Image: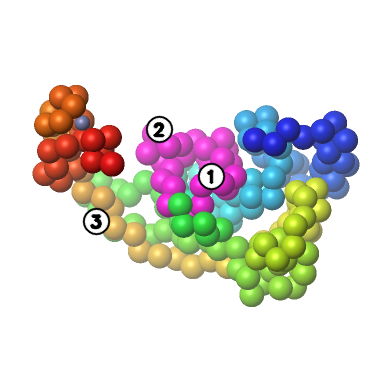
Amino acid sequence: MRKNSEEEKSQMETILKQVKDPELLSQIEKVVPFHGFLTSGALIGIQMLNIARRELDVQDGERIFVTCETKSCMPDPFQILAGATIGNNGLKIMNWGKMAVTVNKQAPEGASSIKGIRILLDSEKTKDYPKLHAWFLNTEKFSHLEIVPILLAAGEKVYSWKFVDLDVPVRNKKRIQCCKKCGEMFIQHDDELLCGGCTE
Ligand SMILES: [Zn+2]
């Protein structure tokens, strides 16, 4: 991670003084120490989380499941603010390089599908904010200090979302296989006889 100068930190403090919503400010204050700095991607993650919570009517303390379509920055707010982590299987990362997430609540026992929401940073909508649009399409370089205020001002106007039906994964009994090559134990997904390390 890039080390941010004292100068940048004080500029960011000035930007955050403009944040009127105390809930949003408190979310930002929780994300910063974990993520290191308020990056544009981390703020986008916070804004997407808030859309998902409202649209899915997520209650405080209720578990959510998140699929994040980029590995940079955006996953962290979901881990910090929603407790959807890689380790508890609440967060799945598809490294598709897309500014999009899909969020759903816990499916009821026995359900085979559940309603979720997919939220996207929409390039049709970022067009209304030329600097943000150029940052998104990487046609020009901007610092987070330039992009964060635009995201704060735009709020939800740059996102699009739609509800989606998601399959609830069937839990199979965990099978442990001894790798035929290295002799170490691994969780078998199909009928593979070699562990992931030996397959690569
Ligand atoms: Zn092996």
Q: Residues within 10 Å of mark 3 (few under 14, many from 20)?
A: few
SS type, badge 1: helix
Amino acid type, mark 3 = Ser
SS type, badge 2: loop
Amino acid type, mark 2 = Gly
- The vertical placement of 135 against 143, above or below, is below
How far is the residue under mark 3 from the one under mark 1?
26 Å
- The vertical placement of 136 against 193, above or below, is below
Q: Which residue is mark 3?
A: 112
Q: Residues within 10 Å of mark 2 (few under 14, many from 20)?
A: few
Please state if 113 lies on the left or on the right of 6 as rendered.
Answer: left
User: Number of numbered discs present?
Assistant: 3
SS type, badge 3: loop
Ligand 1 placement by image quarter: top left
Residue at 37% in and 46% down: 106
- The vertical placement of 11 against 70, above or below, is above
Residue at 43% in and 43% down: 91
Tell me, yes or no, whether the highlighted magenta stretch contains residue 92. yes
Amino acid type, mark 1 = Pro
Q: Which residue is mark 2?
A: 87
Cβ atoms under marks 2 and 3 closer than 8 Å: no
Question: Which callout, 1 or 2, points at the residue further toward the start of the chain?
Answer: 1
Q: Which residue is mark 1?
A: 75
Find the magenta span and give its range.
69-94
Residue 69 percent across, percent down from the top left: 48, 55
Foreground: 183 or 124? 183
Residue 36 percent across, percent down from the top left: 68, 33
Residue 87 location, quadrant: top left
Please state if 4 lies on the left or on the right of 93 as rendered.
Answer: right
Residue 112 percent across, percent down from the top left: 24, 56
Label 3 CB-ligand 1 distance < 8 A: no
